[in-house]
Image: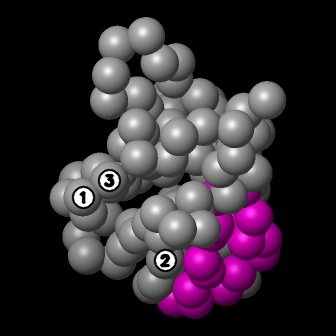
Amino acid sequence: QVQLVESGGGLVQPGGSLRLSCAASGIVFSRYTMGWYRQAPGKQRELVASITVGGNTNYGDFMKGRFTISRDNAKTTVYLQMNSLKPEDTAVYYCNARPRFSGDLNYWGKGTLVTVSS
């Protein structure tokens, strides 16, 4: 059974930081590019960041250097360090496992809510 379990969300003040974690199980971690997406109320889901098994990263344009994605292949966990948070970063953040090979499936976590508010 595949599970992507996010943690680390919560309420933070503007300018603050949070670190999200996504623990993956039931997949061969090296067969997946891992990513974080977010969806704010009334908006489409958008890419926050992704990282390949080799560590190559891709970020959404709105990041402007504030967020950093990383992965620990030994722990089958992907992280998102978020700094200088803004109210517009408020959203549900979803972990994604995108397959590198045909025949493997795409997986999503259930999401973790990040609220940036004073």
Residue at the spot 67% in from the left edge and 85% down from the top edge: 13
Q: Amino acid at mark 3?
A: Val
Badge 2 or badge 1: first in the primary sequence: 1
How far apart are the two marked residues, 3 and 1, measured between alpha carbons? 4 Å
Q: x and y percent of residue 26 in the render?
A: 69, 38
The answer to whether marks 3 and 1 mark residues whose Cβ atoms lie closer than 8 Å is yes
Badge 3 or badge 2: first in the primary sequence: 3
Q: Which is more toward the observer, 41 or 109? A: 109
Looking at the image, can residue 80 be seen?
no
Write down the region rendered in magenta.
6-22
Residue at the spot 57% in from the left edge and 59% down from the top edge: 76
Q: Is residue 76 left or right of residue 30?
A: right
Q: Is residue 67 left or right of residue 26?
A: left
The answer to whether marks 3 and 2 mark residues whose Cβ atoms lie closer than 8 Å is no
Q: Quadrant of residue 112?
A: bottom right
The residue mark sitting in front, 2 or 1, is 1
How far apart are the two marked residues, 3 and 2, measured between alpha carbons? 18 Å
Residue at the spot 73% in from the left edge and 71% down from the top edge: 8
Secondary structure under badge 2?
strand
Mark 2 sits on what residue?
81
- Quarter of the C terminus within the rendering: bottom right
Label for residue 54? 1
Is residue 100 within the magenta segment?
A: no
Q: Amino acid at mark 1?
A: Gly
Mark 3 sits on what residue?
53
Q: x and y percent of residue 19 in the render?
A: 60, 78
Which residue is situated farthest in the bottom direction here? 16
